[in-house]
Each structure stands twice: as structure tokens, then as C-alpha cells.
Image (spheres, helix red, strand yellow):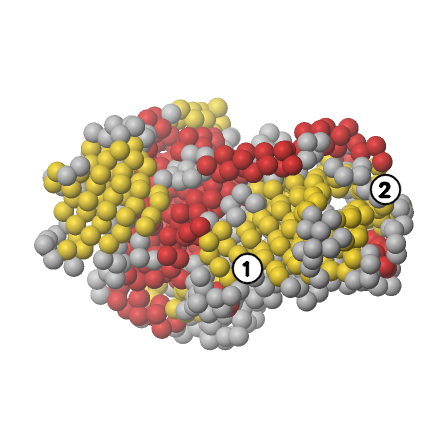
Amino acid sequence: MFKNEPSSIERQLGGARYVLKSPKTLPNASGFLWNQNMLIQANCRGFALAQFMQPDAGKYVSGPAFEAKTFMQPEQPYYANHPGRFVYVKDNADGSIFSAPYEPVRANLDRFEFIPEPHQISWISEFNQIRLTLILRLPTETALECWQISVEDLSGQVRDLSVYPYFPIGYRSWMNQSGKFEAALNAVVCRSIEPYQKVQDYFKNQSLHELTFLAADVPADAWETSQSMFEGEGGLHNPSAIQQNVLNNSVANYATPTAVMQFKTKLKPNEVKQIHLLFGPAKDLAQISTYKAQFLTQGQAQFNNRAEEFKAYLSLGKGVLQIETPDSDLNAYVNHWLARQLYYHGDVNRLTTDPQTRNYLQDNMGMAYIKPEVSREAFILALSQQHVSGEMPDGILIQEGAELKYINQVPHTDHCVWLPVCLKAYLDETGDYELLEEVVGYADSEEQSIVSEHITRAMLWLEQSRDERGLSYINQGDWCDPMNMVGYKGKGVSAWLSLASAYAMNVWIDIQRTVDPNLSEPLQFLVKQSVQINQKVNQHCWVDDRFARGITDDGRVFGIAQDDEGKIFLNSQSWALLSGAADASQTPLMLQAIKQNLDTPYGCMMLAPCFTNMVEDIGRVTQKFPGTAENGSVYNHASAFYAYSLFVQGESDLAFEQLKKMLPTDEDIHVKGQLPLFIPNYYRGAYYQFPDEAGKSSQLFNTGTISWFYRCLVEQVFGVAGCKQGLNIAPKLPSHWSHAKIQREFRGAIFNIEYHRSNDCSQQLVYLDGELLKGTCIQNIKPGNTYQVVVKLPI
């Protein structure tokens, strides 16, 4: 139960289900569902965003005007004609109407509930003693929405109603768009042809789905396919077509299409009737017929199957950690939602065919805790697209025929960094050091090398991609994509990338020492270079109490206190802590500078003060609105780096604080504006410049944060990281926890672990099945066994 407004938000089943009881409390609150071929994010008021693979990501509904086709956007604005899934109900006795979930009529409902669960999203709307329940489910593979509409009388009297599912299609094509009702299919079918100019695009477009359809298992009494005819003079609040006794049964010929059906529904006292719908894209009418047979002809039975099948699908991504701690908010998210968000990223690669290399590697770092075999394949695929020089591409092509698009056509210089950083988590989790001996080819050569050689070449490429000062070239961006003008002339450098390179080299050297303490000559060279890089960053980029972000093409050091804006960047400080560049005298100065300039109630801002005007030697990051995305938001991916670096430094309480601020809680949920079902890519920053907007969620669940959040919990908070020998126990619980319990799955075994703070010990003690463990590593683990572990910690 959330304390601020206990009547409006409830947490049920330990956090497996949330119930939002007002469409106005968190008007943008949403849930998302996905499968192998599609994704839908639906909010509490009925608006929805959806995309599917064909084979690249596309949409099957649009807004009312022609839209640019890009990636999922943060802070998606909603408006009256925004795509959504709505159902109108008219009482034929008095002509009164309402709509569910809430839009477009916005009637003063007697009851409202928005209920996102891991396997489905539901809405309950009651008005004038009529209950309308909507449930959305997905198949596990097909790009289709499966809907159930339940209409129920609560008055104890006979009711004469009309039910109108309204699924707007939007403006789809300036070349060719239409809509009509196909009686043989009992479906509204809308068609659009993808606009093109080049002859070669005609052939490329053959893979596209031209149809979007809405089919029902109950015969429609009437229908409407023209958006303008449906709205008429009444608009969406009170459509002219619904004011009539029956819809117009019109055809949309080169007009904005829509999908509306009318079902005349007579209810006995307290009776419930159901309608099942399919909505989605199709290649042709035959495919719609196949979909109906597969998902709709048996109505309720098939709809029930969707729930069980999707639960089974989610169970494959349940992760390796269940927790019971004094923090109920953390328990709810970790036990029911964290692994789900992690699974989404790793299982469908954010529904793209060319994920950015850094995203692909970090998402599959997280997948090591879900399906490590998928991570293994991903590392091999990524390395197979490496250049023989060691350089990694800007994106990984994961399907035949895929092309590098959009941001992946802009050269970035950080991708090699993520190979050892992410591989370390996989090796710790699996002990699969045989991967390092796998032979993999290169994208631009017939040569083949073992994985170890690939990664060593990547590290050597980072070492060689430095200027005369010994700092890493940034080209047109590093991890921060829009920092695109620091080095576009070929001279600018990134302090962050230099530090990240040193850290990556150190991680790789540690991995190699685990394999063989006698380092090869190239690895010995990397040992020296990592030390040198840290020294060079200190020489050129340490200013007063912080590390600068970089040096521009024209030699300006930026990200320092002397700047007007962008005086401090979080990532430079975090990775200096990781790489070892920051010494014992610098660390407290940096932490104080972060606290003073970047800390907010919602997490640490990525930079501050936010840029308010274009800075031409930094780039388009300075053109983003202050406090959004990379321009000074609380960018949770960067906050996760910071948390991880703090754990490494032994600042466990401060690190845990960063993790907790990523989750909406009863103290800030109304500011953040989202339910704690996912961690968004950012919360608004500019805390001191634009305080009224600070803390607002982007509502975007695509983020590299999740893999790092999970890794922080496993490795650091609960201290149950793997190593080559077994499971190492080294928890860093927050000091205010006196106890905790977890269940950890590891290499086929289950570990039930209890943590207790005790006056009886002055150092950590680990008991394995009642016996005091010598050291901290549990070895000789047998798959299938269950182990009982007690960890005593000093107070």
C-alpha cells in the first residue's frame, strides 16, 4: 500500500500486481508486454504504443498525421487522437455513453482500476451500474494483441446496451490507405502501402505487412472504417456515429481508416457477456483467417491458453535471485519485475535487427543471469563482426539482411570497452572459460582467432586509438551518443573513454590471470598501458576536485568548475573510481563535488548545470532540453555505473542509495509518475534549474540500467558472485539492515542464504549446511543440490 494516497494505488500479491484506482493520479502510468515479434506499452487511460518485426521494427497503427519512423521515444506525449485501444458503451435506453479505460469520453466513473501484471494488463471501468473489464494478453511469438471485453450488469435489471470497440488505425500512407469490413472474417481490415520513391525500395517493401485488422468472435451488428465518419461533429468525446442507432457500415477509400465494431448486447440482471478480439498486422486475408482459427474460434479457452503460455514463457526468464529484505519496495521489484525487464532486453534485443554494440553487449551481460547460453552466443556473434584491427562495429547485425541504421551510421569509439567488462559477469556466473578458446572469424578478413585473441586485439585497439597526450579519441561520440562534436575534426578526446579503457584493460588482465598467471607479452604491455592511461588522465583532466569530461578538437578542457554550464559529469568520476585513476586524496573531493552539484532526491544527474544553449565544440547533447536524456537528467544507466563504482570503493550505503532512488516509492511516486514495474532510462534532472519538472519519469523501459542493477545486487549487495572455483560470499548489505534472506540459483544448484548482523562476531562468518566455511568461496558445487547458508556479519 502506498502511504501518500492509500486509496488510489495498491500493491498486491507481494508486488506481482499493482492496482491504480484513478486515471488521474498517475495519468501516464503504463505497463508493457512483449513477445518474440512485438511490443506494446499501454497506459492506464487506454493510450498505447506498439511495434512489431517485419523484419525491422514497424508499426501497425499511427497517429492522425504522418509520423517519422524512429525508435521508441521517451516522455511520449498523449493527445486526443493518439493511438490507443478503447471501448465505448452506450445505454440504448437513455443514450448515455462512457468509454473504457477512461479516454476518450473521460466520464466520471464510479470505479476505475488499472491492473498491470507480468503476463497481462487489465482495466476495470464502472459507470451507471455497468462494469466493463478489458484484458490484454499476447501470444508468445505472433505479433497479435488478444483482447477480452467483459460487460456486466450491476443493477439487477435487464440492460439494453451497445458495445463499440474503437481501435484507431491512424494516418498510414499518403500513397494508398483504406479500410473496409470483411464479412467472411467478421473483421475490419485496413490497408496501407508504405510510401517510397526509389525503385529498389519496392522490392525491399515486399516483406512489409500492408494490413491491420480487428476481428471478433461475436458477429458484429455494424461497423465503421472511416475515422472522420466515426467522429463526425461530436468528436471522440461523443462521436456522431455512436449517437445513431447503428454505425454507418462505411468504407474508407483513401481516407484515414479506423476499426470500430458495434455489438448490440442485451443483459439479463447481473449477467456477464464477453467478446474476444484480435488486433494486429497481417500480410493478407488468408493470414487473418489463419490467425482467427489459431487464436479466436474457441474464444475463452484460447484466451485462457494465452495466459498460461505467457506465464510459461516468462518463467524461462525468472533470473537467479529471489529476496526477502526489510525493504518491501525492493522485494516487490526484484521478485516480480526486475528479471522480467532484464529478460525483455536480452531475449528480443529491444526489437531491433542492429542493436548498438554497447547495448547488445550490456544487455547480454544481464542475460548471463537469465539464459547464459544466449549470452554466450551473443558474445561470439559480436566478435564475428569485429574488424581484424580489433575495432568493434557500431552495431551488431543479428539477422540476415540487416543493415546498420540511424545512430549506428555515426562513428563511436567506446564499443571495445564493453567486451571484457560484460564477459567478466558471464564468466563469473557460468565458469565457462572454455569460451575463451572458441575460434571466431573477423568481418573483414579470412583470419580466425580464439576469443581471447579477439578481446586482446580490442584492448590493443583502444590503446592505439589515443592522441599524443595518451588520451582516447572520441570521434563523433563515446557512450554518450550525442556528444558528437568534441572530436569530429579528429583531435578531440574523451576522459571518460580513457578511464573506461584503463578499466577494461584491467578487467581483461584479471580474467587472463585467472586462466594463467604468466601473462603473455601483449598482456604485460596492457598492464603498463592501463597504468599510463590513468596517469595521463590525471595529468591532463584532473582539475581541482573532479575529472573533466574531455578535451575538444581545439584543445579546450571541459566539464570543469570554470565552465558556465556542464561543470561536472558523473561518468568521469564513476569510471575514475573503477579504473584506479582516483587516489585516496581525490576520492573524497570527487564524492563531495558529486553531492554538491549532481545529487537530487531522484538520483544523481548526469551533468550539471544542464546546457541551455548549443555548445558547438561539444555537440547536440547541449541542444537537448535541459534535464532530459543526456543533458543532465537522472540518467539511470549512468547512476548504475556510479553505484557500482561506489560498491567497489566500499561506499556501500551510498551505493545502495543510488539503486533505491531508481525505484518509485511512496515518497516520490506522484512526482515520478509511474508505477514501479520498470526502471526508466531517466528521470528529469535540471533539479536546480527547472525544479517543477525534476523527477518526472521518461516512461521508457529500454535501458542498459537493468543489467547493472542486477549485477550490483548479485555481486555487491548480496555478495553472491561466482568465480572460477565456485560461489564467493562477500555481501555489502546496507548498514540499516539487520537481516535478509535470498534464494540464489547458481550453476544448477540452489542456495538458501540468510544474513544476520550479530554481536557475536568481529568479521564475516559463513556456515554451509551448518559447518563453518574456511574462507569465503563455496566450492565443489553439485548441480541439483540445495544448500543452506548462514552468513553472520558484525554490527
Residue 415, by quadrant, is top left
Q: Quadrant of the C terminus?
A: bottom left
Q: Nearer the viewer, residue 157 or 539?
A: 157
Residue visible at 42% across and 34% down in the picture: 371
Q: Quadrant of the N terminus?
A: bottom left
Residue visible at 30% across and 28% down in the picture: 784
In the visual, does 304 lie left or right of 596?
Answer: right
Badge 2 marks a residue whose secondary structure is strand
Residue 418, by quadrant, is top left
State whether residue 363 is above or below residue 81.
Answer: above
In the visual, does 714 lie left or right of 344?
Answer: left
How packed mark 1 is, by other alpha carbons closer than 10 Å (few <14, some 14-19, many 20 or more), is many
Q: Earlier in the sequence, mark 1 or mark 2?
A: 1
| Residue 502 seen in render | no
Q: Nearer the viewer, residue 58 or 170?
A: 170
Q: Which residue is mark 2?
A: 180
Badge 1 marks a residue whose secondary structure is strand
* Distance (Cα) linking label 1 and label 2: 37 Å
Residue 111, by quadrant, is bottom right
| Residue 763 seen in render | yes
State whether residue 203 is above or below residue 617.
Answer: above
Residue visible at 51% across and 38% down in the picture: 311
Instruction: Tell me, for residue 20, which label it has, or none.
Output: 1
How packed mark 2 is, by other alpha carbons closer than 10 Å (few <14, some 14-19, many 20 or more), is many
